[in-house]
Amino acid sequence: MDVISPSAGDFPSDGDSPDPDFVFSSQGKVLKSFGIAERLPVALNSPDFTGGAWDERLRNAFRALKAKGVDNPIVVGAVPFDSRQPAQLFIPRRYEIADAARFVRDAGDDGAALEVAGIHETINRRHYESAVGQALDLFRTTALKKVVLSRPLDIEARRLFAPQSLAHALLRQNPGAFVFSVPVAYGQTLIGASPELLIRKTGRNIVSNPLAGSARRSPSREEEERRVKALLGSQKDKTEHRYVVDAVREALSGHCATLSVPEGPSVIRTPTMLHLSTEIAGELADPSVSSLRLAHALHPTPAICGTPTDPAFDAIGRLEGYARNWYGGMVGWMDSQGNGEWALSIRCGLASGRNLRLYAGAGVVADSKPAAEWEETAAKLTTMLNAFGLSAAVATAGSGMAGSEMAGLEMAS
Ligand SMILES: C=C(O[C@@H]1C=C(C(=O)O)C=C[C@H]1O)C(=O)O
């Protein structure tokens, strides 16, 4: 896969705007940061990061800020799916941690409602299902066991996207998610409501909560119970899930004095999806290892890439037909002790002017059916579409919506 930088120039920020530049919510709190004290760009898969030079720069920057009286400086930002591409990481001038419910309440209903000029299914159903079919062939002929195949959905609005309003709407609708808004390049903001914690480090303690194996929620309680049972009993979903848990266990065990991995998965609910979930908790052998270093050791897990990692990564590059860039990477924050949280950048979109590219993927294994994987990506897209009240119109796209209703329907070769 080509190494193309996803950033299109730095974004200016003097910290004087009343709106935060960076937003990240977790467990009922929201971290808002303003301005940029120092940019610390780095590709995680580069000697600069792996050899420790970046950590040294970060330590020096933190030391200088502490000398100026900043109590607990942090670094925030986003890492792309391909760790060879530069991450957008920066130390904010200032930040505050607010109550998430108040953040939403104070914002009022600032209306993320959208007047759509066009919806472009850049990778259409036929293309996506054919990619799944090719993955099924690879399972028969190569060592590949799982690959996560994703697709973009491009929305063009009549007005500029307002990342702040979108973040408020997402947090209002997804209070349990990691809602984020991150400026990743000049005029480009990555916004989403991720259900998946890659890593949290608090002192010696770490937690990772991989998800894999999914079903759409149902408005009927009985039907939902049926789906929960079906998910817990599905061999296909359990296999898909096990690959992720095994990889997380393997990546973390070398760093941990203790690591506890539940016997089997449970089901978690987002407002739109049911997922098989395993919460893995551990105690670090060396508590000075930073959350970003652990995130790098984990990334990309089979929740977003596949098993084994390298052939899955190559298959994604060959089969998906578009560049993921920030989708499938991670977003988060970290302090000078390395404490922090990194959530997978999923259920998200990249806003740029009047354009918003949404993304969704699904784990494909030998028992997968192309049509069901397409439906799963459609279900996952509703998290973002709901923020605009759009899901009813778009959820059926590619599964019945007439081509003429979709402005500029394109087919990728
Ligand atoms: C890839 C996505 O989600 C991931 C894939 C899942 C699956 O295949 O079941 C479930 C949760 C996430 O780990 C996405 O939302 O785009």
Image (cartoon, grey):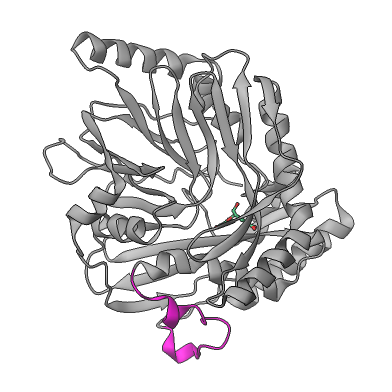
Q: Is residue 240 above or below residue 16?
A: below
* Residue 44 included in the magenta stretch of the image: no
| Residue sticking out furthest to the front | 222
Q: Is residue 140 above or below residue 85?
A: below
Q: Quadrant of residue 36?
A: top left
Left or right of residue 172: residue 211? right
Residue 167, percent across and down? 31, 55
**Residue 310 makes an appearance in the image:** no
How many badges with numbers are in the image? 0
Name which residue lies at 68% across and 30% down: 251
* Residue 403 included in the magenta stretch of the image: yes
For the stretch drawn in magenta, the main secondary structure is loop
Residue 214, percent across and down? 64, 61
- Of the four image quadrants, the one with ligand 1 is bottom right
Quadrant containing the C terminus is: bottom right
**Residue 24 makes an appearance in the image:** yes
Q: Is residue 156 above or below residue 15?
A: below
Name which residue lies at 29% across and 50% down: 101
Name which residue lies at 50% across and 22% down: 49
- The residue range painted magenta reads 388-406
Residue 88, percent across and down? 38, 36
Q: Quadrant of residue 183?
A: top left
Near-viewer residue (255 or 151) = 255
Residue 8, percent across and down? 34, 46
Q: Is residue 282 above or below residue 28?
A: above
Left or right of residue 111: residue 198? right
| Residue sticking out furthest to the right | 141
